[in-house]
Amino acid sequence: MKKPESKRPWWKKKRERQPTGNSDHYHSKEWKSFKRMFWAYPQNQYCIKCMTPRAKGFQVDHIEPLPHGITIGEFLERSSLHLCQAMCISCHSRKSAHEKTR
């Protein structure tokens, strides 16, 4: 039996998100609690690269990429706020793309 076709035009269809190894952890209570603490600090109210004031869509960036095989849960157990920085979406995307080419 065929699925009914979506009435959305092709350019508005939802994209399937590719799961990452840590994607479940980013929705955990621990990560949300960590983010609340992180955003409470005044130095995290601006993008570390371009100094744009914090707005919707700002992201918590790991200063160093997570070592292969470590989960967010393990990261949170042994980390502190100084291992992360605030970044706007465009700066974070550029940094992530650069890290993937290494």
Image (cartoon, grey):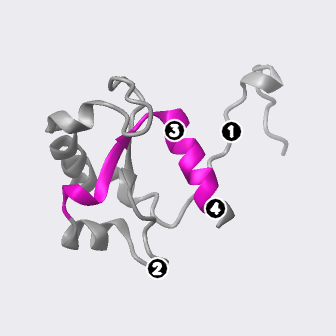
- Sequence-first disc among 2 and 1: 1
Tell me residue 41's x, y (percent): 15, 39
Q: Residues within 10 Å of mark 3 (few under 14, many from 20)?
A: some
Secondary element at image label 1 = loop
- Sequence-first disc among 2 and 3: 2
Disc number lying in front (2 or 1): 2
Magenta-colored segment: predominant secondary structure: helix
**Amino acid of disc 2:** Gly
* Real-space CA distance between mark 4 and mark 3, rounded to the nearest whole angstrom: 14 Å
Q: Which mark is residue 15?
A: 1
Q: Taking 29 as reference, is 18 left or right?
A: right
**Amino acid of disc 4:** Lys
- The residue singled out by tag 2 in the image is 69
- The residue singled out by tag 4 in the image is 100
Secondary element at image label 3 = helix
Disc number lying in front (1 or 4): 4
**Amino acid of disc 3:** Cys
The answer to whether residue 8 is above or below residue 64 is: above
Residue 97 covered by magenta stretch: yes
The residue located at (80%, 20%) in the rendering is 9
- Sequence-first disc among 4 and 2: 2
- The residue singled out by tag 3 in the image is 91
**Amino acid of disc 1:** Arg
Numbered range of the magenta stretch: 80-99
Q: Taking 83 as reference, is 66 left or right?
A: right
The answer to whether residue 56 is above or below residue 74 is: above
